[in-house]
Amino acid sequence: MALSEQEILSGLAEIVNEETGLEPEEVQMDKSFTEDLDIDSLSMMTIVVNAEDKFGVRIPDDEVKNLTHVKDAVTYISNHQG
């Protein structure tokens, strides 16, 4: 069964928290990974790998550069799950 965007956001927030120590409630749809959340490219790659494992999706490297905001990642995962 497909997860809702809210469930994906919550799971993504947990992954970001584990990688960066940011509080999960700081990870919101309108936040930019780099500007608002201060996530560097190395941490972003770890987050992507963990998200792939958690949600059972594949996020190609050339797609990662398009995931600038939390909403981009949530929408991508939502559209590519199961």
Image (cartoon, rainbow, N blue to C red):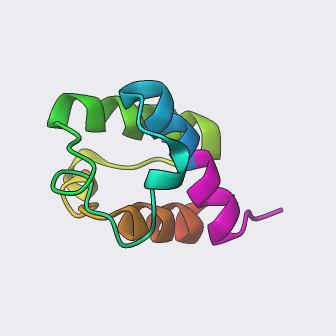
Residue 22 visible in the picture? yes
Residue 49, image x and y in percent? 42, 33
The mark tally for this picture is 0
Is 4 on the left-hand or right-hand side of 37?
A: right
Chain part drawn in magenta: 1-11
- The residue sitting at the right extreme is 1
Residue located at (27% from left, 30% from top): 43
Residue located at (53% from left, 53% from top): 25
Up-down relation of residue 13 to residue 9 (above or below): above
Please tell me whether residue 4 belongs to the stretch shown in magenta: yes
Please tell me whether residue 6 belongs to the stretch shown in magenta: yes
Is 37 on the left-hand or right-hand side of 71?
A: left
Up-down relation of residue 54 to residue 37 (above or below): above
Is 81 on the left-hand or right-hand side of 40?
A: right
Q: Nearer the viewer, residue 65 or 71?
A: 71
Residue located at (30% from left, 64% from top): 69
Residue 45, image x and y in percent? 29, 34
- Our reading of the magenta stretch's main secondary structure is helix
Query: Which of the 4 image quarters holds residue 2?
Result: bottom right
For the N terminus, the quadrant is bottom right
